[in-house]
Image: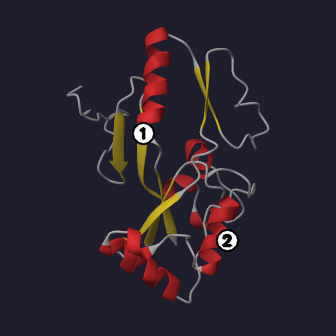
Amino acid sequence: LVLVGIVALDDQVADVLAAANERGVYVTVSAGRTGIVGGAVPAGGTLLSLAEMNGVLGVRRLPDGRFAVRVEPAVTVARLEEMLAGGDMGLDPATLPPEESDALAALKADERGYFYPPDPTEMSAHLGATVATNASGARSYYYGATRRHVHSIRVVLPCGEVIAAERGIYTAGDGRFEIKLAGGG
């Protein structure tokens, strides 16, 4: 199985969100616009498009032997499935840290084949949207919905601060959890 880590162009997104927050305006996040409920239709305010944030940034091997692929939020399910099926993530091993270069070589050499387990039905859906909605599909009965397959995530808060959360680091108690921000908040 492959776990997905979502990465974004933090500084640009943070600037947009912080400016909108200061002005007190709504922000509608948009990218693939594959949803059928109109979630990408803004109710005024700022429209933040993530459509060009579609890069595969890296791959690593987790301690349990699974692979984790780092992607930007607009990578489509179809593109990820295609890359996994062919073992070619479109990455240049020479530009990766040694541990990621080794993980990429191991992924390419592994003959078992890999896929995105949640199979959220819409192959043109962006991975960021599947994470945001905890999307599921036919294979989810066996493998579980998207949330189960996300190892880490970077989130830009409305104030412009960026948090990085890895599975198991933050846990809820009494229905809440706290994350310490870089600025001390």
Report if residue 167 is visible in the image. yes
Q: Residue drawn 64% across and 77% down?
A: 85
In the shown orientation, is residue 179 left or right of residue 75? left
- What is the spatial separation of the Cα atoms under label 1 and label 2, in whole angstroms? 27 Å
Image coordinates of residue 121 in percent, x first then y, are: 75, 57
**Which of labels 1 and 2 is toward the front?**
1
What secondary structure is found at the residue carrying circle 1? helix
| Above or below: residue 170 compared with residue 47 | below
Front residue of 13 and 76: 13
Image coordinates of residue 170 in percent, x first then y, are: 31, 45
| Above or below: residue 42 compared with residue 108 | above
In the shown orientation, is residue 116 left or right of residue 16? right
Quarter of the view holding residue 78? bottom right
Q: Quadrant of the C terminus?
A: top left
Residue type beneath disc 1: Asp
Report if residue 65 is visible in the image. no
Q: Residue drawn 69% across and 56% down?
A: 120
In the shown orientation, is residue 146 left or right of residue 169? right
Q: Which mark is residue 10?
A: 1
Q: Dot 2: within a 10 Å radius of its alpha carbon, few (fewer than 14), some, or many (20 or more) residues?
A: some
Q: Residue drawn 43% across and 12% down?
A: 22
Residue type beneath disc 2: Glu
| Above or below: residue 8 compared with residue 156 | below
Image coordinates of residue 80 in percent, x first then y, are: 62, 65
Q: Which mark is residue 82?
A: 2
Image coordinates of residue 11 in percent, x first then y, are: 41, 35
**What colouring method underlies this structural image?**
secondary structure
Q: Residue furthest toward the left? A: 184
Q: Which mark is residue 87?
A: none
